[in-house]
Amino acid sequence: MRYGFVIDQTTCIGCHACTVACKTEHDVPLGVNRTWVKYIEKGAWPDTKRFFSVMRCNHCTDAPCVTICPTTALYKREDGIVDFDTDRCIGCKSCMQACPYDALYIDPEDHTAQKCNYCAHRTDVGLQPACVVVCPEQAIIAGDLDDPTTRIAQMVASEKLSQRAVEQGTKPNLWYKGAHEASLDPLETIDPGDGGIWQDPAASWLAVDLTPRSNGSTYPNSGPNPNAAPGPKVVHEHRDSPARVVYNSRHPMPWGWRVSSYFLTKGIAAGLAIVMALALLSGAAIDSRWARWGVPLAAGTLLAVTGILLVWDLKRPDRFLFLLTKGNPGSWLVRGAWILSAYAAVLGIWFILGASGGSDLLEIVMWIAAVIGLAVAGYTAFLFGQAEARDLWQSPILLWHMIAGAFAAGGGATLSIAFVVGIDNQPLLDTATWCLIGGAAALGLIAAAELTSRHPTRNVAEAMHHLTKGAYKTEWWIGGQVVGVAIPVILGFIYAGNPDLEVVGAIAGLAAMAGIWFADDAYVKAGQSVPLS
C-alpha cells in the first residue's frame, strides 16, 4: 500500500476550498498552511493567463525530512504516509531544510513542525482526506498507488503527469495533471515584489532575499524593491516575459545568526585542542598552566556556548534532551550531539588531570581530544548534506571548509588569548601561528574552488549568485575573504617573522575568527535564499 495524490490543475479553479478545509480539519493557525494554492500569471494585458497549483507535502518514498529528523517526530507509515508526532518534536527546523517542497512549517502556537499528514486520522477509518472531500471540481485525487483498480493508480499509469523537484531523488508520491511548468518550478518565475494579491509586501528584509535574480531580471526574488522610486509605477512587459508569482504562502528562512555563530564557537573549541596537540610535535611543554588546564577550560567554555546556541535556536528548547533520550541514530543532529558530548567528556578528563597535577596520561588525552575535535569541526558538513533542499550545502568540499576553519580559529584564538593572559610557550605560539596562516589560506583556496567549479544545479547557481553578487556579497567578500583570509595571512606572516609583535598576532587571530563568522553567515543565508515553492 502506498498512498498518494494527483492534482488535476486542468479543473482546479483556485477557490482555496482545500486550504480552508485543511485549516478547519487540523485547526491550522493563521499565517501558515499545510496545503495552499499558488497563483502565477503569464503574459501582458490584455493577453494574460493565471495558473493555479496546489502545494503540499509529497509523501515521498525516500523522505529526507524523516532521515534528518533527530527525534523521529517525522516517520513513514507502512501505507506510505509521512506522518509526525508533535510530542517528540524539538523545533530544530532541520526538516524544513531537508524538504524540497517547502511543505513544513513551525506552528506559531505549539512551536513544533507541522505539515500535511494525508489526514491520517480519517484515512485510518476509511475516509478521504478533507481536501479531497471538499474540492468542488474533484481536482484532488487520492488513493492507493499500488492498487491498479484505483483511479489514482490508473491515472499515474496512463496519463501524462508531472512532479516537482524529481531531481532531488525523493521519489515524491504527488503528481500534477496539466500544471504549467512555471507553477511547479520556482526558478521559472519571478516575484515582482509588490506582495501579490491579498497581502502587503514583506516588512522585514530578514525574512526574504532581495537579491536580483541571476537571469538579469530587474525584479527581486521576494519583497519590495529597495531601489524603486516612491509613487505609482507602470511596468511595460513583453509578451514573452517570465511568469510572475501573484500569490503564494510565505516561507521565511528557518536558520539565522545563531547557526552561523555555532559554526564559529564549535570551530574555536575544536581548534584549541588541535593546535595544542600539534604543538606537542614541535616540542611544546605540557607543564604550563595553559597546556594543563587552560586549553580544556577555554575549549569547554566555547563548547558550552555552542550548546547554548543550539538549544536557543530550538523552538521547543524544553525538549532538547530528546536528542539523547529519543534520538534518531541516522540524523547527523543526533550524531553531532554524541560527538559534542564525547568531546565535553574528554575535555573534562583533561582538565581534571591537568589541574590535579597528573601527567602520565595527559598527553594521550590531548591527542584523543584533538581527534574528536576534528569530528566536532567537521560533522556539520554531513548535517548540512542531509538538508537535501539546499543544494548549495551539498558541496563535497564543505567538510574541508569546516576543518580549515577550525585550524584558523584555533590558531587565532590561541594567539589572541596569549596576548591577553600571556603564554610563555614559544613552540605552541609558533604552531598556532602556522595553523592560523594555513587554515586561513585553505579557506581562501576552498572559496576559490567553489567560485570556479561548475554549478551542478540551477539552485546552486542561484545561491552562489546571491552569495557573491547579491544580498550577501559584502559579507562574503569583505567580511569573509578580506577580513577572514587576506588579513590573517598577511599579519600572520608578519608575526611569524617578528614574534615580539604579539599585538599583530592577536589582531590576526581576531580577524580570522570574525571573517569565519561573516563567511559562514553569508553561506547559511545564501543557501536558504533560493525559493522552493
Image: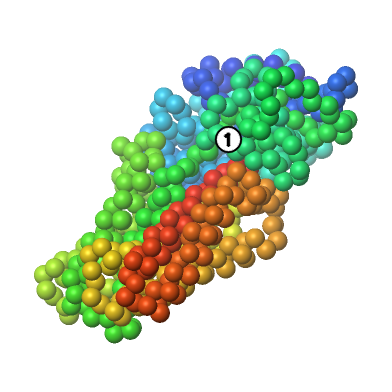
Q: Residues within 10 Å of mark 1 (few under 14, many from 20)?
A: many
Q: The C terminus appears in which quarter of the rendering?
A: top right
Q: Residue at 27% across / 73% down in the picture?
A: 366
Relative image position of residue 432 (x, y in whole percent)? 36, 73
- Above or below 153: residue 522: below
- Above or below 134: residue 490: below
Amino acid type, residue under disc 1 in the picture: Val
Q: Residue at 42% across / 38% down in the picture?
A: 91
Pick whichever, 161 or 218, lies toward us: 218
Q: The N terminus appears in which quarter of the rendering?
A: top right
Residue 328 visible in rendering = no
Residue ID for mark 1: 208
Residue 485 placement, left or right of 244: left
Q: Residue at 50% across / 39% down in the picture?
A: 254
- Answer with the quarter of the image where residue 416 lies: bottom left
Residue 341 visible in rendering = yes
Pick whichever, 52 or 177, lies toward us: 52
Relative image position of residue 24 (x, y in whole percent)? 53, 16
Pick whichever, 241 or 483, lies toward us: 483
SS for callout 1: loop
Residue 274 placement, left or right of 22: left
Q: Residue at 70% across / 38% down in the picture?
A: 186
Relative image position of residue 357 (x, y in whole percent)? 11, 74
